[in-house]
Image (spheres, rainbow, N blue to C red):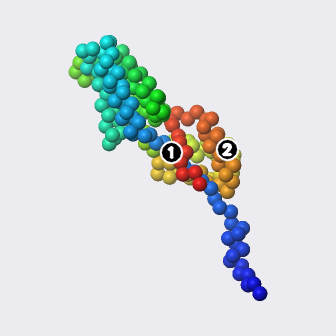
Amino acid sequence: MLSFSPGNNLQTKKQKMSSFDIVCEVDIQEVTNAVDQARREIGNRYDFKGSNCEIDFDKNKPALMITADDELKMQTTIDILLTKLIKRSVPVKSLVYGKTEPSGRVQKKEITIQQGLSKEQCKTINQFIKSIKIKVQPQSQSDSVRVSSKKKDDLQAVMQAIKEHNFDFDVQFTNYR
């Protein structure tokens, strides 16, 4: 004779929650490679001969410091860098531009690379997910948003909606379970 306990019945009815994280992450090694390529191109170009154009990359911050003689060379240097970043699949929406500051005879501009979402960006994502009215639970974490649901189809619908929406920052999806 089989014995049946009521506790076993709960585990069969309980449906597993699926989830994924929305993050903003940049591969620092790809940025390093793009900076090296941009430096080589600037060194080889005729219009940059004898100029003080440089790109410095600080992996600890992470941030780029662009130094140029004038505004035209500054913009050309940034364009070369952006081209190299795009070729290496680095999202350029994750770059945060600082002000151009004169420093003696040269100009400097700092470009920080965003790693992780800010609280405001998490809030924007949460509001967007709630506005599309799909039964999921978005939850802000320190620098990401976790979205969970019982239905994987709902999670995929949210992913598709986020991809189609044009945020002013870059997002990726990780930890899809």
The residue indicated by pointer 1 is 23
Q: Secondary structure at mark 2?
A: helix
The residue indicated by pointer 2 is 157
Residue 15 is marked as none
Kindly give the residue lying farthest to the top in the view shown.
Answer: 47
User: Camera-side residue: 35 or 18?
Assistant: 35
Q: Residue at x 36, y 25 (%)?
A: 38
Kindly give the residue lying farthest to the bottom in the view shown.
Answer: 1
Image: 120 above or below 51? below
Q: Is residue 143 left or right of residue 10?
A: left
Q: Is residue 75 left or right of residue 140?
A: left
Question: Three-letter amino acid code at disc 2?
Answer: Ala
Q: Residue at x 26, y 20 (%)?
A: 52
The numbered mark, 1 or 2, whose residue comes first in the sequence reads 1
Q: Quadrant of residue 10?
A: bottom right
Question: Three-letter amino acid code at disc 1?
Answer: Val
Q: Secondary structure at mark 1?
A: strand
**How far across and how far down the image is residue 83, in percent?**
44, 24
Can I make out residue 136 in this image? yes
Q: Residue at x 36, y 35 (%)?
A: 32
Q: Quadrant of residue 68?
A: top left
**How far across and how far down the image is residue 138, in percent?**
59, 51
Image: 175 above or below 34? below
Q: Residues within 10 Å of mark 2 (few under 14, many from 20)?
A: few
Can I make out residue 101 in this image? no
**How far across and how far down the image is residue 31, in percent?**
39, 35
Kindly give the residue lying farthest to the left in the view shown.
Answer: 104
Question: Quarter of the image containing the N terminus?
Answer: bottom right
**How far across and how far down the image is residue 4, in percent?**
73, 81
Q: How far is mark 1 from mark 2, CA to CA?
A: 17 Å
Question: Quarter of the image containing the C terminus?
Answer: bottom right
Q: Residues within 10 Å of mark 1 (few under 14, many from 20)?
A: some
